[in-house]
Amino acid sequence: MVSLLKKPFFSSLQTLTLQRLTRTLSYVSGERRSSEEVSSETNSSFIHPTAIIHPKAVIDQDVTIGPFCTVGSMVRIGKACKLYPGSHIFGDTEIGERCTLMTGAIVGEDIPGRTTIGCNNIIGHHAVVGVKCQDMKYKPGSDCFLDVGDNNEIREYTSIHRSSKPSDRTVIGDNNLIMGCCHIAHDCKLGNNIILANNTLLAGHVVVGDYAHSAGGAVVHQFCHLGSHSFIGGGSVVSQDVPKYMMVTGDRANLRGLNLEGLRRRGFSSEEVTGMRRAYQKMFMPVDGKLGGIEDRLAEVEKTRELAMLDVVRSMVESIRDSFEQDRRGICKFKHWSGSYSSS
């Protein structure tokens, strides 16, 4: 009885597979007969027969597209990209060379605007990149944008949203590690060589400088700036700016000194670190109680000749001053380890 059923079953399965393969190949190449025709004939890409590829999609050479993937009509995929099973690319989206989309990753959305991904990026399992923002002020039908640079690793379940208005864009720089379950909201601007640990959440319009580092579970209020080489402690809730080179922790996050370990790893000299420590003490731990507010303390640092000569000190002072400009949120307060707050 088994032998009687086995042969027709596998025969019909083979027929179904061949039919599906024929339909898919026709869908992929049958309607694309223009300047792409010659290149497609020499294209060494592999497309699994169960993938759904729009005939207008532009796919470069050596691209691998696995089972059950979807590639939309306005998608452009660069050389040597890999789409693992069940990954999808929608909307006006450009993927640079040698990018990898892991299983379940979604890049782009069929809404006005554009998503641009650079080269050598990894989009992790079930990450969602380049979709509509969650800002109630977003007007349906408005263009919105996301630009991602090169050599970024965006891990599993991370979400990165496009901008909330045509005049702005969400930007991710180069060489960043964005760990699992992070969220980067609309209009954020991230620099280069940043590490966001698991479950770091950035609200809209947050700016993150180069080499900034967050520990797990950090939450950052909208419009805050995290300075270059700064460190955000695990579980911190950041509601004001973090100046360059500094470390914060707590709810609400308070300044806890310089990010000394990060500065050491990045190769800052002992002279630079010593100068920054002296400047930090003058600004946030003054011996002279008559020194007034933060502007007076910044001026005192600038009057100290050996400190004012150091580029890193001038950069730190400028970072703090900028945080008090109009429409900025000021800086996180300083808190002594004993628990008492400074007057700054």
Image (tube, rainbow, N blue to C red):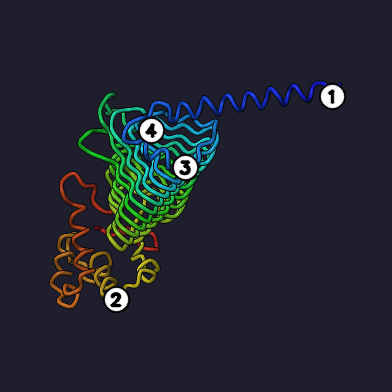
In the image: residue 232, left or right of residue 156: left
Separation of marks 2 and 4 at Cα, in angstroms = 56 Å
For mark 2, what is the residue? 274
Separation of marks 2 and 3 at Cα, in angstroms = 56 Å
Q: Nearest to the eye among marks 2 and 3: give it.
A: 3
The residue lying at 31 percent from left, 35 percent from top is: 35
**Callout 3 amino acid:** Ser
Q: Upstream in the sequence, badge 3 or badge 1?
A: 1
Towards the viewer: 27 or 344 = 27
For mark 3, what is the residue? 45
Q: Quadrant of the C terminus?
A: bottom left
Crowd around label 1: few <14 · some 14–19 · many ≥20 (10 Å): few
**Callout 1 amino acid:** Val
Position of residue 237 measured from the top left corner of the image (x, y, whole percent): 38, 48
Q: Nearest to the eye among marks 3 and 4: give it.
A: 3
In the image: residue 122, left or right of residue 189: right
